[in-house]
Image (spheres, coloured by chain):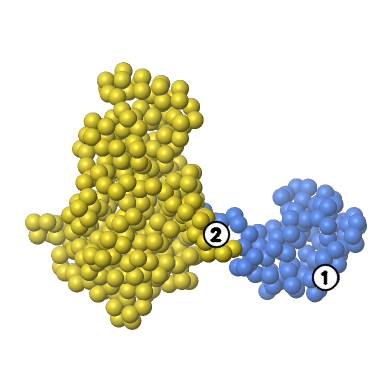
Amino acid sequence: MNFWGFSISEARVIDYDKNDKTLAQIMATEVPSSKLCIGCGGCTATCSAGNLTEFNIRKLQMLAKRGENKELQTQLHKCMLCGKCLLVCPRGVDTRRMIWSMLRFINS
Amino acid sequence: MNLEGKQQIWKDYQKDIADDRYYYARSCIRQTFFPGSEWAYLDILGNKLGKTVFDDPRHTTCTGIGYHSDVVPVETIMTVVARHFALMTEAGFENITPSCITSFGIYTEILHTWEQHPEWEEKTRDFLWKATKREFKKPKNLAHTSDVIYKFRNEIAAQKKYSLTDVHTGQPLRVVDHIGCHYAKMFPSKGIGGAEFPAVLSGMVNAWGGESIDYPERRHCCGFGFRNYLVMANRGFSVANSKKKFESMQPYEPDFIVTNCPGCAMFLDKWQYTISEMEGTTYGPNGYGIPVLTYEEMAALVLGYDPWEIGLQMHQVSVDPLLEKMGISYDPEAKYKNIRGENIGRPQCPTYLKV
């Protein structure tokens, strides 16, 4: 039971000095095409998982690049690795491999 | 820019503060949580500096907390403030000095409103007459009590018994200041240093031998914000603001925090306990917190007042380590005794925060 009736709100500021950028660096090395993303959201629009849940690939790659890894942990497992996003990406980003790279990092 | 130019610009950040004869407006929060602080101010002004201060028992709350919480209408607060001015006029005073930053902001805001919209002043005069049969003159000078102490900082320095220095190392104490938002953020020209270059507290610190630390979140709000605290669901946001400040000042290893706002002193002091109980985090060395002083308490310590006489035992964060650093002699046994020497009981110890 929370004795206080409230808890300390998390800051919503994106603190680049404190955020862990390791995942972003690994992703850039393992999946160089991830750097080409323009955030159009085509991947999210065609995503089967995103059709039924709040799973959002565009948002996840942005969070990973910002070093905000907390939300990734709760969302990534929803991806079924079907690869439809790969087919629609106008920049040719290897989105499935990007997800796979993030999953490996989170699980390690 | 040459020095003359800088000095000229700095003049724009100063304000007129009356020399003597002050009508004192007490603070709801300060007199409740740190009553010794207001007593110390009155004693310093009256007995150390020889000034005339009128502490009027008829004076009431300015209703600022209710106003900023949307439960007191603007007509009501204007009439209450008009009554304060009427009491000041009846007592034969022209300079009003509120102890509270909220009241200072309220008085400033209302005087400014009346200047811009004279019809509101007329309306308020009418309300006051109907309600109390009183009339008033507007104050010639409005200054916060921290402005008054700032004005006499050198006179206080001339009488000081202790310096803001660590007697063990001889180094100046590292002091972080926190200025109440309603002091100069609403009307920057009404505060010393404006909103950008807060100097009212650092001026005192420097004059009394300490070192003022300009930490990154110095100008950030303490999080009181009235509704932010008064509505329980919002308190998480309130405490998050103080936490942001503590995290910002902690790397500089400050010896204490000094504030000029009653609400800020209370929150910066008591939230340290709350954060320690919620997260186990403390911000001072060895499990202690960072002591929080009001500027009156800081002035009183420098002038050699007894720490328990000015009510430092009312603070949540222990000030004992600071007193030892400053070399102030005090009786630890007298900490929880009243003026008649009777035991007033010890507060329960926090789980993590050392006291």
Which chain contains the residue that carries disc 1?
A: A
Answer left or right for B256 relative to B242. Answer: left
Tell me, yes or no, if residue B83 can be seen here. no
Q: Nearer the viewer, residue B114 or B221?
A: B114
User: SS of the residue at dot 1?
Assistant: loop
Q: For the C terminus of chain A, give its image quadrant.
A: bottom right
Residue found at the very far bottom of the displayed protein: B169
Q: Which colour is chain B painted?
A: yellow
Secondary structure beneath label 2: helix
Front in this rendered view, residue B31 or B128: B128
Q: Amino acid at mark 1?
A: Val
Q: Quadrant of residue A20?
A: bottom right
Q: Which corner quadrant of the image does residue B304 belong to? A: bottom left
Residue at the extreme front = B4
Residue B279 x, y percent position in the rendering: 44, 63
**Closest to the observer: B55 or A49?**
B55
Q: CA distance from mark 2 to mark 1?
A: 57 Å
The total of numbered circles placed on residues is 2
Choose mark 2 or mark 1, whichever is in front. Answer: 2
- List x then y, in percent, for residue A86: 88, 59
Residue at image location 45% in from the left, 35% down from the top: B112
Residue bearing the label numbered 1: A31
Above/below status of B282 relative to B152: below
Which mark is on residue B336? none
Q: Is residue B185 left or right of residue B299?
A: right
Res B5 label: 2
Q: Residue at x 27, y 34 (%)?
A: B88
Q: Position of residue B266 (x, y in %)?
A: 35, 53
Instruction: Please determine whether, in this image, residue B18 is positioned above or below residue A72.
Output: above
**Which chain appears blue?**
A
Amino acid at pointer 2 = Gly
- The chain identifier of the residue carrying mark 2 reads B
